[in-house]
Image (cartoon, rainbow, N blue to C red):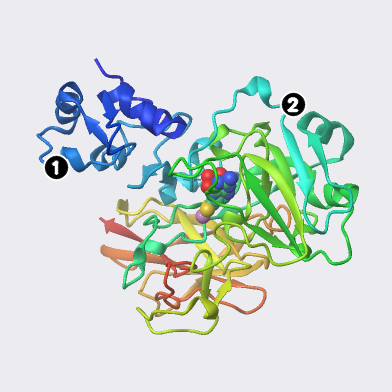
Amino acid sequence: MMKKIGIHKLYSQNSTEADRLLWGRETDPVSRRGFLGNVGLISMSTVLGGAIPFAKYMPQGLIPAALAQSDTSFEIPGKEGLVILNDRPINAETPAHLLDDNITPAKHLFVRNNGIPPDISESDYESWELQIEGESCSRPQKIQLKDLKTQFKHHTYQLQIECGGNGRSEFYPPARGNQWTTGAVGCPKWTGVRLLDVLNYVGIKNDAVYVAYEGADKHLSGDPSKRPISRGVPLRKALEKESLIVWSMNGESLPLLHGAPLRMVCSGWPASVSGKWLTKILIRDRVHDGEKMGGKSYRVPCNPVAPGTDVDDANMCIIESMPVKSLITFPKSGINYSINKHMEVRGHAWAGDASVKDVYLSINFGVTWQRTILKKPVNRLAWQHWSLSIDFPKEGYYEIWARAEDNNGQSQPVVLPGWNPRGYLNNACHRIAVNIQA
Ligand SMILES: Nc1nc2c(c(=O)[nH]1)N[C@H]1C(S)=C(S)[C@@H](COP(=O)(O)O)O[C@H]1N2
Ligand SMILES: [Mo]
């Protein structure tokens, strides 16, 4: 009998091999297309509950959507309750009520992979080599993870990461890409060394402007000359004291899905700048031109455009600090609640490089707002917790809306913010539904 648990792990390691193991799919040597042999067809049809008329066109290495979308029977190893988005390879987000912890545990942190994660065994972690080079690096060299650990001071910060496309699913006209709702965000505690210390150690030339990463993951096509993603940040962001190269998350070794043995964390910007499976750091004398730095990737129109506009690449600007945002993590949307009890509503708020000044709640579709009790962040760039005890005037259906404002006077919009071709930066108010009963 086929083992259901583990399908995503299998596919993340080597999707072609997973196909072969699970379904017996082979590759046609002439067309190079994957085909399901008879046995494969029977096993896949059985699992999916019906014949697959177009099976011969089904791309190789694709997790069938029926399985990819289930959030119960197919768990990613090490994860709990995440919703798998219909894409290849693994991309999964966290339902809002599972982000209730102040420090996001590994099992509840979203996963976003642009390529095929490398297969690295833990025994190779300590000898992992990080190459530091680039036009503006004075003394290019390789540093092993064990030397990073012994030669530089360790720092621990709680830092939020949010995918630039979090909230994409709400834009209209729709944008292609993972249809994230609200769950591509989290705030674990990371331990490592400061990027600043490592950069100073190898020497930053005067003409340095950008710091970029390369990772060990492979391009989806399998073509070794292509890279899935290689992004970076301007030097000033790289030199912030919270910009880290980390090997640990929440006091444990960094999970492989989140970039072990080493990843970058530059919080407050699209999480795509926080490179996983770090093999290289580049000190560049120009704005980094790696994969997903140009075109429409992680870029938005420099000036606002009408929804659906075909924007020229020359008029697109790189996303830097993310906008102010908040999440209601308790109660869970859709609950029934007694009118005789106060309701303790709570959640988190964050604001890119800025900090959150206030969070407000409305239970009347934005007519009036109540200010919540907001805590300071444990450190810069950590999300902040807010809570408020509220009462409802009578029975019935309500929506709770949360709206945060940052210390620059920027507020979350209650409706969608400006449309952009790839659906980035949706920081509209989070809304949940509650039924108040006698
Ligand atoms: N090497 C590498 N780093 C990467 C990515 C990737 O595909 N490969 N994805 C980026 C994107 S788009 C996001 S949102 C975050 C996701 O981090 P997580 O999977 O640890 O939550 O990692 C970033 N770093
Ligand atoms: Mo992302």
The part of the image, by quadrant, that contains residue 11 is: top left
Considering every residue shown, the one lying at the far front of the view is: 30
Left or right position of 260 against 90: right
Is the residue 203 above or below the residue 255 in the image? below
Return the residue nearer the eye: 38 or 272: 38
At mark 2, the secondary structure is loop
Return the residue nearer the eye: 53 or 384: 53
Amino acid on which the number 1 mark rests in the picture: Phe
Q: Nearer the viewer, mark 1 or mark 2?
A: 1
Q: Mark 1 Cα within 10 Å, few/some/many (few <14, many 20+)?
A: few
Is the residue 43 above or below the residue 196 in the image? above
User: Would residue 186 be seen by someone viewing this image from the given angle?
Assistant: no
At mark 1, the secondary structure is loop
Left or right position of 229 against 379: left
Return the residue nearer the eye: 174 or 407: 174
The residue that appears at 48% across and 43% down in the rendered structure is 223
Q: Residue 127 got which mark?
A: 2
The residue that appears at 38% across and 50% down in the rendered structure is 332
The percent position of residue 108, horizontal first and vertical second, equals: 49, 40
Q: Name the residue under label 1.
A: 54
The percent position of residue 280, horizontal first and vertical second, equals: 71, 45
